[in-house]
Image (cartoon, rainbow, N blue to C red):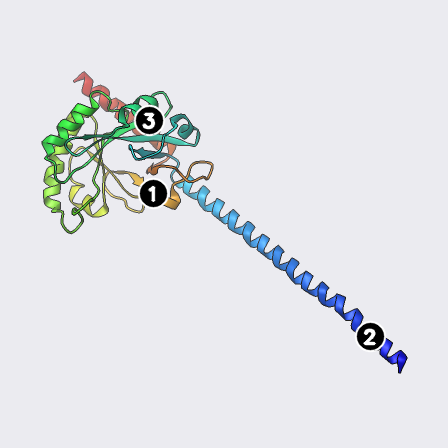
Amino acid sequence: MQAQKRSDYQREHRRRPSRKLGWTSVILVGLVLLGILGGHHVINRHARQQALLRNYPVRGVMLDQTDEYADFNQLQTNGIKYVYLRATQGGALADDDFNNNYTRSIGSGLKVGVYHQYSFSSSVREQEQNLKRTLGNNIGDLPIMINISYYNDYNAETVDRKQLARRMRQLVAWTQRYSQRPVLIKTSSANYQVLKQLPHTEFLLPRAKSGRHVTFASLAKQEQLYNNGKGSDFRMTAFRGSKVQWNQYLQVLKQNEIRSDAA
Protein backbone atom coordinates (compact mmCIF):
# COMPACT_ATOMS: atom_id res chain seq x y z
CA MET A 1 0.00 0.00 0.00
CA GLN A 2 2.81 2.38 0.92
CA ALA A 3 4.57 1.60 -2.37
CA GLN A 4 1.32 2.21 -4.23
CA LYS A 5 0.96 5.68 -2.63
CA ARG A 6 4.53 6.59 -3.57
CA SER A 7 3.90 5.46 -7.12
CA ASP A 8 0.74 7.56 -7.37
CA TYR A 9 2.57 10.57 -5.95
CA GLN A 10 5.45 10.17 -8.41
CA ARG A 11 3.08 10.00 -11.37
CA GLU A 12 1.25 13.11 -10.16
CA HIS A 13 4.53 14.91 -9.55
CA ARG A 14 5.75 14.08 -13.05
CA ARG A 15 2.58 15.47 -14.65
CA ARG A 16 2.90 18.96 -13.17
CA PRO A 17 6.06 20.05 -15.05
CA SER A 18 4.52 18.87 -18.29
CA ARG A 19 1.54 21.24 -17.78
CA LYS A 20 3.92 24.16 -17.17
CA LEU A 21 5.88 23.22 -20.25
CA GLY A 22 2.67 23.09 -22.29
CA TRP A 23 1.61 26.61 -21.32
CA THR A 24 5.10 27.92 -22.00
CA SER A 25 5.00 26.40 -25.47
CA VAL A 26 1.61 27.99 -26.19
CA ILE A 27 2.88 31.41 -25.09
CA LEU A 28 6.05 31.07 -27.17
CA VAL A 29 4.07 30.02 -30.25
CA GLY A 30 1.73 32.96 -29.71
CA LEU A 31 4.62 35.39 -29.48
CA VAL A 32 6.16 33.96 -32.64
CA LEU A 33 2.85 34.32 -34.50
CA LEU A 34 2.45 37.90 -33.28
CA GLY A 35 5.96 38.64 -34.45
CA ILE A 36 5.24 37.16 -37.87
CA LEU A 37 1.96 39.06 -38.20
CA GLY A 38 3.63 42.27 -37.06
CA GLY A 39 6.42 41.75 -39.57
CA HIS A 40 3.91 41.18 -42.37
CA HIS A 41 2.04 44.35 -41.36
CA VAL A 42 5.24 46.42 -41.48
CA ILE A 43 6.24 44.88 -44.81
CA ASN A 44 2.77 45.45 -46.30
CA ARG A 45 2.66 49.04 -45.05
CA HIS A 46 6.11 49.69 -46.51
CA ALA A 47 5.01 48.13 -49.81
CA ARG A 48 1.91 50.36 -49.92
CA GLN A 49 4.01 53.43 -49.16
CA GLN A 50 6.51 52.58 -51.88
CA ALA A 51 3.70 52.00 -54.39
CA LEU A 52 2.22 55.40 -53.59
CA LEU A 53 5.60 57.09 -53.86
CA ARG A 54 6.13 55.44 -57.25
CA ASN A 55 2.69 56.56 -58.45
CA TYR A 56 3.32 60.16 -57.41
CA PRO A 57 7.09 60.72 -57.54
CA VAL A 58 6.80 64.53 -57.82
CA ARG A 59 5.39 65.93 -54.59
CA GLY A 60 5.00 69.39 -53.17
CA VAL A 61 3.63 71.16 -50.10
CA MET A 62 1.37 74.14 -49.47
CA LEU A 63 2.29 76.62 -46.73
CA ASP A 64 0.58 79.52 -45.02
CA GLN A 65 1.08 81.51 -41.83
CA THR A 66 -0.68 78.87 -39.71
CA ASP A 67 2.04 76.32 -40.45
CA GLU A 68 5.15 75.73 -38.40
CA TYR A 69 8.54 77.02 -39.58
CA ALA A 70 9.51 75.29 -42.82
CA ASP A 71 13.10 74.26 -43.52
CA PHE A 72 13.08 74.36 -47.31
CA ASN A 73 16.45 72.67 -47.68
CA GLN A 74 15.22 69.80 -45.49
CA LEU A 75 12.04 69.54 -47.54
CA GLN A 76 14.18 69.19 -50.65
CA THR A 77 16.28 66.51 -48.93
CA ASN A 78 13.05 64.66 -48.06
CA GLY A 79 12.15 64.45 -51.74
CA ILE A 80 9.85 67.45 -52.07
CA LYS A 81 10.09 69.04 -55.54
CA TYR A 82 8.00 72.19 -55.23
CA VAL A 83 6.28 74.43 -52.70
CA TYR A 84 3.21 76.64 -52.99
CA LEU A 85 3.18 79.65 -50.63
CA ARG A 86 0.01 81.51 -49.76
CA ALA A 87 0.41 85.15 -50.69
CA THR A 88 -3.05 86.65 -50.36
CA GLN A 89 -6.61 86.02 -49.25
CA GLY A 90 -9.64 87.88 -50.51
CA GLY A 91 -9.46 91.55 -51.29
CA ALA A 92 -7.28 92.84 -48.45
CA LEU A 93 -5.38 90.14 -46.56
CA ALA A 94 -1.73 89.23 -47.15
CA ASP A 95 -0.15 86.18 -45.52
CA ASP A 96 2.12 87.30 -42.66
CA ASP A 97 4.81 84.76 -43.60
CA PHE A 98 4.74 85.16 -47.37
CA ASN A 99 7.72 87.47 -47.86
CA ASN A 100 9.89 85.53 -45.41
CA ASN A 101 8.93 82.16 -46.87
CA TYR A 102 9.45 83.37 -50.41
CA THR A 103 12.92 84.76 -49.67
CA ARG A 104 14.02 81.62 -47.82
CA SER A 105 12.66 79.25 -50.46
CA ILE A 106 14.74 80.79 -53.25
CA GLY A 107 17.92 78.79 -53.75
CA SER A 108 16.61 75.73 -51.90
CA GLY A 109 16.34 73.66 -55.07
CA LEU A 110 12.54 73.68 -54.83
CA LYS A 111 10.35 75.11 -57.55
CA VAL A 112 8.29 77.89 -56.00
CA GLY A 113 4.67 78.75 -56.61
CA VAL A 114 2.38 81.30 -54.98
CA TYR A 115 -1.33 81.07 -54.35
CA HIS A 116 -4.33 83.25 -53.64
CA GLN A 117 -7.16 82.16 -51.34
CA TYR A 118 -10.31 83.00 -53.25
CA SER A 119 -13.05 85.00 -51.53
CA PHE A 120 -16.74 84.63 -52.41
CA SER A 121 -17.54 88.00 -50.82
CA SER A 122 -14.73 90.30 -52.03
CA SER A 123 -15.03 91.74 -55.51
CA VAL A 124 -12.84 90.31 -58.24
CA ARG A 125 -11.25 93.74 -58.72
CA GLU A 126 -10.28 93.91 -55.04
CA GLN A 127 -8.71 90.45 -55.22
CA GLU A 128 -6.73 91.38 -58.33
CA GLN A 129 -5.36 94.49 -56.66
CA ASN A 130 -4.48 92.56 -53.51
CA LEU A 131 -2.48 90.06 -55.56
CA LYS A 132 -0.68 92.79 -57.49
CA ARG A 133 0.12 94.78 -54.35
CA THR A 134 1.45 91.77 -52.44
CA LEU A 135 3.31 89.88 -55.17
CA GLY A 136 5.04 92.54 -57.19
CA ASN A 137 7.48 90.48 -59.24
CA ASN A 138 7.59 87.59 -56.77
CA ILE A 139 5.51 85.17 -58.81
CA GLY A 140 7.86 82.18 -58.52
CA ASP A 141 8.44 79.46 -61.10
CA LEU A 142 5.00 77.84 -61.35
CA PRO A 143 1.50 78.91 -62.39
CA ILE A 144 -0.18 81.15 -59.83
CA MET A 145 -2.72 79.06 -57.97
CA ILE A 146 -6.21 80.18 -56.98
CA ASN A 147 -7.48 78.06 -54.11
CA ILE A 148 -11.28 77.81 -53.99
CA SER A 149 -12.50 76.31 -50.73
CA TYR A 150 -15.72 76.84 -48.81
CA TYR A 151 -15.93 78.69 -45.51
CA ASN A 152 -18.54 80.07 -43.09
CA ASP A 153 -21.91 80.14 -44.87
CA TYR A 154 -20.41 79.49 -48.28
CA ASN A 155 -20.83 75.84 -49.21
CA ALA A 156 -21.81 73.61 -52.10
CA GLU A 157 -25.50 74.38 -51.55
CA THR A 158 -25.29 78.17 -51.14
CA VAL A 159 -22.71 79.06 -53.81
CA ASP A 160 -24.11 79.80 -57.28
CA ARG A 161 -21.72 77.93 -59.56
CA LYS A 162 -22.65 79.92 -62.65
CA GLN A 163 -21.78 83.11 -60.81
CA LEU A 164 -18.57 81.47 -59.60
CA ALA A 165 -17.68 80.65 -63.22
CA ARG A 166 -18.29 84.27 -64.31
CA ARG A 167 -16.16 85.67 -61.49
CA MET A 168 -13.40 83.14 -62.08
CA ARG A 169 -13.32 83.90 -65.80
CA GLN A 170 -12.49 87.50 -64.93
CA LEU A 171 -9.95 86.64 -62.22
CA VAL A 172 -8.21 84.00 -64.35
CA ALA A 173 -7.94 86.38 -67.33
CA TRP A 174 -6.29 89.04 -65.17
CA THR A 175 -3.95 86.56 -63.43
CA GLN A 176 -2.87 85.01 -66.73
CA ARG A 177 -1.99 88.41 -68.18
CA TYR A 178 -0.16 89.38 -64.98
CA SER A 179 1.96 86.23 -64.81
CA GLN A 180 2.15 85.27 -68.50
CA ARG A 181 1.46 81.69 -67.41
CA PRO A 182 -1.58 79.46 -67.18
CA VAL A 183 -3.53 79.69 -63.93
CA LEU A 184 -3.80 76.68 -61.60
CA ILE A 185 -7.19 76.29 -59.88
CA LYS A 186 -7.43 74.12 -56.78
CA THR A 187 -11.04 73.20 -56.21
CA SER A 188 -13.61 70.43 -55.76
CA SER A 189 -14.67 68.00 -58.47
CA ALA A 190 -18.13 69.62 -58.57
CA ASN A 191 -16.71 73.11 -59.15
CA TYR A 192 -14.36 71.70 -61.77
CA GLN A 193 -17.37 70.76 -63.89
CA VAL A 194 -18.35 74.42 -64.33
CA LEU A 195 -14.79 75.79 -64.56
CA LYS A 196 -13.06 73.29 -66.83
CA GLN A 197 -13.80 75.23 -70.01
CA LEU A 198 -12.12 78.43 -68.80
CA PRO A 199 -9.15 79.33 -71.04
CA HIS A 200 -5.57 79.36 -69.74
CA THR A 201 -6.38 77.08 -66.81
CA GLU A 202 -5.00 73.96 -65.19
CA PHE A 203 -6.54 72.16 -62.21
CA LEU A 204 -5.59 70.60 -58.92
CA LEU A 205 -8.25 68.07 -57.86
CA PRO A 206 -8.52 65.18 -55.37
CA ARG A 207 -6.12 62.51 -56.58
CA ALA A 208 -8.78 60.01 -57.73
CA LYS A 209 -10.24 62.56 -60.16
CA SER A 210 -9.00 63.22 -63.66
CA GLY A 211 -10.06 65.32 -66.60
CA ARG A 212 -9.09 68.09 -68.98
CA HIS A 213 -5.94 69.90 -67.83
CA VAL A 214 -5.91 68.25 -64.38
CA THR A 215 -2.18 68.46 -63.78
CA PHE A 216 -1.95 68.26 -59.98
CA ALA A 217 -3.63 66.22 -57.25
CA SER A 218 -4.31 66.73 -53.56
CA LEU A 219 -3.52 63.72 -51.39
CA ALA A 220 -5.36 62.21 -48.44
CA LYS A 221 -3.68 62.56 -45.06
CA GLN A 222 -2.41 58.97 -44.96
CA GLU A 223 -0.91 59.42 -48.43
CA GLN A 224 1.13 62.50 -47.57
CA LEU A 225 4.57 60.93 -47.23
CA TYR A 226 8.16 62.01 -47.58
CA ASN A 227 10.55 59.72 -49.45
CA ASN A 228 11.71 58.23 -46.14
CA GLY A 229 8.17 57.04 -45.40
CA LYS A 230 7.46 59.61 -42.69
CA GLY A 231 4.25 61.61 -42.79
CA SER A 232 4.39 65.16 -44.08
CA ASP A 233 4.28 68.06 -41.63
CA PHE A 234 2.44 70.16 -44.21
CA ARG A 235 -0.42 69.81 -46.69
CA MET A 236 0.92 67.82 -49.60
CA THR A 237 -0.03 67.79 -53.26
CA ALA A 238 1.45 65.95 -56.22
CA PHE A 239 2.12 66.46 -59.90
CA ARG A 240 0.15 63.92 -61.93
CA GLY A 241 3.05 62.53 -63.91
CA SER A 242 6.56 61.13 -63.86
CA LYS A 243 9.77 62.99 -63.10
CA VAL A 244 10.48 63.16 -66.82
CA GLN A 245 7.05 64.67 -67.46
CA TRP A 246 7.65 67.14 -64.62
CA ASN A 247 10.83 68.38 -66.26
CA GLN A 248 8.99 68.66 -69.57
CA TYR A 249 6.21 70.61 -67.86
CA LEU A 250 8.73 73.07 -66.39
CA GLN A 251 10.42 73.43 -69.75
CA VAL A 252 7.14 74.29 -71.48
CA LEU A 253 6.38 76.91 -68.81
CA LYS A 254 9.78 78.47 -69.38
CA GLN A 255 9.46 78.44 -73.16
CA ASN A 256 6.03 80.08 -73.03
CA GLU A 257 7.39 82.73 -70.69
CA ILE A 258 10.28 83.47 -73.08
CA ARG A 259 7.88 83.79 -76.02
CA SER A 260 5.66 86.15 -74.03
CA ASP A 261 8.64 88.35 -73.12
CA ALA A 262 9.77 88.44 -76.74
CA ALA A 263 6.32 89.47 -77.92
Residue 115 location (% of width, % of height) = 24, 32
- Residue at position x 45%, y 46% in the image: 48
Quarter of the picture containing the N terminus is bottom right
Q: CA distance from mark 3 to mark 1?
A: 19 Å
- Residue 111 numbered mark, or none: 3
- Residue at position x 23%, y 45% in the image: 188
Residue at the limit of the structure toward the bottom, as seen here: 1
Residue at the limit of the structure toward the top, as seen here: 262
> What residue sits right under mark 1 in the picture?
219
Q: Which badge, 3 or 1, is on the more N-terminal residue?
A: 3
- Regarding residue 173, the answer to whether it shows in the image is no
Q: CA distance from mark 2 to mark 1?
A: 70 Å
| Residue 200 found in image quarter | top left
Under circle 2, the secondary element is helix
Badge 3 amino acid: Lys
Under circle 3, the secondary element is strand
Q: Which badge, 3 or 2, is on the more N-terminal residue?
A: 2
Badge 1 amino acid: Leu
| CB atoms of marks 3 and 1 within 8 Å | no
> What residue sits right under mark 2 in the picture?
9
| Badge 1: residue crowd in 10 Å (few <14, some 14–19, many ≥20) | some
Give the label, 3 or 2, closer to the camera: 2
Badge 2 amino acid: Tyr
Near-viewer residue (59 or 29): 29
